[in-house]
């Protein structure tokens, strides 16, 4: 299980798989990191975040959007992601953690935003799969 970067017209896409919904969220986030930086150094501080949304797809979008926000505001490259996804009534929640490597320590490409374009999040016989396009 993991991720694969795929070329997309003027953008970059991440195709990911995972045994659980949390695993596939973390794998897409790892793909986002790979889209921004080829070699991630050691170091950086661990951080946690939680996001809620009305459905799984919106949760994935908002989670990735929050990682981009953390990158921009905290000047860190989020990496080494972990995530747990749960349904709470009619809402979905992801509790996640990552390591934030200072942007000054990496050569990073800018990923501007996550998009809903062609987004897929579906359960398979082996777990979960996701496909997400990022605007670069």
Image (cartoon, rainbow, N blue to C red):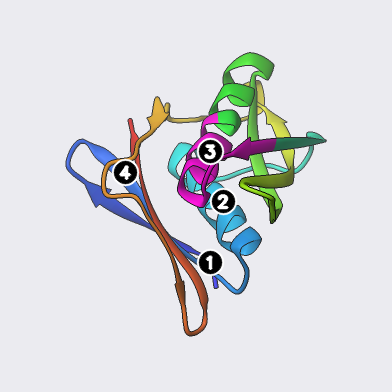
Image coordinates of residue 121 in percent, x first then y, are: 43, 59
Q: Which residue corresponds to mark 4?
A: 12
Q: Which mark is residue 135?
A: none
- Farthest residue, direction top: 73
Q: Quadrant of the C terminus?
A: top left
Between the residue at mark 2 and the residue at mark 4, the CA separation in whole angstroms equals: 13 Å
Above or below, comparing residue 18 to residue 72 in the picture: below
Q: Say if the magenta span includes residue 64.
A: yes
Q: Position of residue 68 (x, y in %)?
A: 54, 28
The magenta segment is 51-65
Q: Quadrant of residue 47?
A: top right
- The residue tagged 3 is 64
Disc 1 versus disc 2: distance between alpha carbons?
8 Å
- In the picture, the disc for residue 30 is 2
Q: Secondary structure at mark 4?
A: strand
Residue underneath mark 1? 2
The residue at the point 61 percent across, 54 percent down is: 26
């Amino acid at each position: 299980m993991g991720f694969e970067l795929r070329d997309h017209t003027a953008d970059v896409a991440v195709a990911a798989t995972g045994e659980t919904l949390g695993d596939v969220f973390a794998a897409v986030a790892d793909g986002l990191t790979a889209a921004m930086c080829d070699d991630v150094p050691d170091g950086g501080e661990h951080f946690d975040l939680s996001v809620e949304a009305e459905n799984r797809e919106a949760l994935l979008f908002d989670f990735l959007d929050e990682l981009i926000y953390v990158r921009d505001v905290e000047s860190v490259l989020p990496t080494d992601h972990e995530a747990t996804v749960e349904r709470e009534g009619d809402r979905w929640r992801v509790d996640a953690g990552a390591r934030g490597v200072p942007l000054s320590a990496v050569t990073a490409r800018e990923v501007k935003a996550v998009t809903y374009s062609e987004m897929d999040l579906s359960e398979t016989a082996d777990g979960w799969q996701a496909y997400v396009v990022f605007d670069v």
